[in-house]
Structure formats: C-alpha cells, structure tokens
C-alpha cells in the first residue's frame, strides 16, 4: 500500500485553537510538570509572564485540534495502527500563553520509502502563527508507516 | 532563577528521572495532548496491531525531555528543540532524560549553546536522541 508520491505539496486544512488555561494545566499535569508557572497565573505573572505559558511541546496539540486529527493520514490510505512518530522539531520565535489564538498551516513536503516499502516516511512542515499574524514557531515532523506485510 | 553562567562545552544538565509511566499517565496525556490514537490507551487495539501492550506517546517522552530544558533555563531561551524517536517506550518504563553541551556559538549577536539530548530507559534502551539550541544571555 504505497503512498502516492503526488501527495507531496498537499496543504492540510489550517487548524485554529484558542489556548485555554485549563488545557495548559491538564497538559502540564500529564507531563509531570512541577513548576507552578505552568499552573498558577499569579505565579506566572510574578515570573514576568503575561499568563500561563504553554510548555515547549504543547504546539503538537494544536495540530491535533480538529474533529478527526488523523484524517490527513486516512486521505493518504494510511491506517492509524501502522504509524509511529519518527522525528519532531520545533523552531521557536515567540512564547505562547493562555489566551492566545493560534493557527497551524501544515504541508506535506516529502514522502519516501525504505526497506523496499516495508517502511514509508511522511514529512510535514507546519507554520504556527498567533492571532495577530506573528509567527510563533515552525514544526517539522516525520511520520513512519510500518508495512510488515512487505518483505524487503 | 537558573543562570547560564559557567556553561561550557561538556557541561552536563542535572538528569531528570521520571517515575514508571502508568496507564493513567497515558490516558491523561492522550486527553491533554489531543493524541487519541487508541494504540496508546486501549490494549485491545494495541494487540490487534501486533503489540504486546500499549506504549507511550513519543511526544510524552519529548515533553519530559522538554522539562529537562525548562528546569535548566527559562523556557523563552529555547531557540530550537528536535528529537528522533529510536525505540518504543513501553508502559511502566522509567525514562531518564539527560543533556550535555556540545558547542557554544555566537548567532545574531547572541551566545547560544547546542545540547545533545538523550532519553534512556532503566534497561538501557535509548528511546530518543535530540538536540536543543539555548540562548545563554
């Protein structure tokens, strides 16, 4: 089930998220965060931040903020049980705080196979902007698709 | 507040040891991160995909490694942060995050340290290899 190389260049539907304090607290709790700037707005302000900051990897949540976050994989004919996260990169331009409205625009920039198609790789680039259009970060990720039925 | 004084090539960050990853943590992270892929929270789905059990989201380990960074410097000093996931993290695994400064450069008039980052499980498996660039002043 090879992925069509014509997928390269596909732009995914942009995603917008209002970053809420409660969501950031849930995320901070789930990752075992203990620094109170990630939970308590008063402590965040004492530390010089305008509100609770989003931890460095929270931006991935933005990309999943859609009714079916994996629809773009289904469109490529990829089953969810086959995927692994291969690589992830963040390049930061500005901090994100509760109260921000973020938009992510993603594009498929490469698709390739290894081991005779037993492993396929989908490379995405995403630009995240704030409500006022300021660029907040770029994300690069690689999704690995396992095709164990393909013998190298 | 942490300061970056005395940082030099070879400086090691204080390691961050994570307690065994529970199924509860995976459920909480699924909700909070928005990654509802059932392979991380539903053993039936994991088994149907040929796995013995559920396994942790890669991004959970990347978030732990991110805590290593934000416990070392204020978050706004992180310029970039990247990882390659090299092995699956099983439920109950105990990751340890570590980092080491490999170079210090001046970029756009800013002193920046490049760090090599690793997440290793108690059995010696390396699950993540990464790099971060941190502004020192």
Image (cartoon, rainbow, N blue to C red):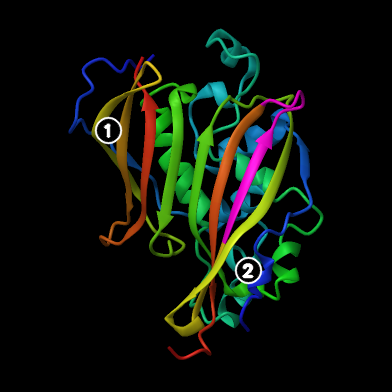
Which class describes the residues within 10 Å of circle 1: few (<14), some (14-19), or many (20+)?
A: some
- Chain bearing tag 1 is B
Q: Which type of secondary structure does the marked residue at label 2 adopt? A: loop
Question: What span is colored magenta in the figure?
Answer: A123-134
Q: Is residue B91 left or right of residue B103?
A: right
In magenta stretch: residue A133: yes
Residue B82's place in the image compared with B3, above or below, is below
The residue closer to the viewer here, A128 or A81, is A128
In magenta stretch: residue B90: no
- Please tell me the numbered disc located at residue A17: none
In the rendering, at what x and y percent does residue B96 appear? 32, 47
User: Sequence order check: which comes first, mark 1 or mark 2?
Assistant: 1
Q: Is residue A19 left or right of residue A94?
A: right
In the rendering, at what x and y percent does residue A17 appear? 76, 38
> Which residue is identified by label 2?
B42
Q: Is residue A119 left or right of residue B108?
A: right
Residue occupying image coordinates x 68% and y 49%: A106
Q: Which residue extends farthest left?
A: B10
Proximity of marks 1 and 2: CB atoms separated by less than 8 Å: no
Q: Which type of secondary structure does the marked residue at label 1 adopt? A: loop
Residue B35's place in the image compared with A134, above or below, is below
Which class describes the residues within 10 Å of circle 2: few (<14), some (14-19), or many (20+)?
A: some
Q: Quadrant of the C terminus of chain A?
A: bottom left
In the rendering, at what x and y percent does residue B61 appear? 45, 50
- Chain bearing tag 2 is B
Residue occupying image coordinates x 63% and y 72%: A5
Residues flagged by tags 1 and 2 on a common chain: yes
Q: Is residue B98 left or right of residue A137?
A: left
Disc number lying in front (1 or 2)? 1
Q: Quadrant of the N terminus of chain A?
A: bottom right
Gap between marks 1 and 2 measured at Cα: 34 Å
> Which residue is identified by label 1?
B14
């Amino acid at each position: 089930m090879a992925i069509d190389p014509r997928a390269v260049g596909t732009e995914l539907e942009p995603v917008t998220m209002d970053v809420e304090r409660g969501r950031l607290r849930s995320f901070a709790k789930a990752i075992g965060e203990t620094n109170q700037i990630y939970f308590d707005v008063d402590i965040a302000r004492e530390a010089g931040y305008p509100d609770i900051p989003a931890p460095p990897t929270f931006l991935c949540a933005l990309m999943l903020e859609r009714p079916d976050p994996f629809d773009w994989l289904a469109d490529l004919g990829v089953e969810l049980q086959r995927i692994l996260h291969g690589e992830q990169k963040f390049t930061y331009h500005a901090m994100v705080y509760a109260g921000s409205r973020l938009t992510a625009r993603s594009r498929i920039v490469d698709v390739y196979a290894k081991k005779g198609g037993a492993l396929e790789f989908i490379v995405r680039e995403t630009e995240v902007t704030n409500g006022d259009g300021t660029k907040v970060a770029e994300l690069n990720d690689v999704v690995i698709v396992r095709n164990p039925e393909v013998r190298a | 507040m942490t300061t970056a004084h005395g940082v030099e090539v070879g400086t090691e960050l204080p390691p961050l040891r994570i307690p065994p990853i529970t199924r509860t943590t995976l459920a909480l992270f699924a909700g909070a991160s928005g990654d509802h892929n059932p392979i991380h929270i539903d053993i039936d789905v994991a088994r149907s995909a040929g796995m013995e059990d559920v396994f942790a989201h890669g991004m959970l380990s990347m978030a732990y490694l991110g805590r290593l960074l934000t416990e070392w410097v204020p978050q706004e000093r992180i310029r970039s942060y990247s990882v390659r996931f090299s092995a699956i993290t099983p439920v109950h695994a105990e990751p340890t995050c570590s980092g080491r400064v490999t170079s210090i450069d001046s970029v756009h008039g800013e002193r920046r340290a490049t760090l090599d980052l690793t997440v290793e499980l108690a059995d010696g498996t390396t699950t993540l290899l990464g790099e971060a660039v941190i502004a020192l002043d």
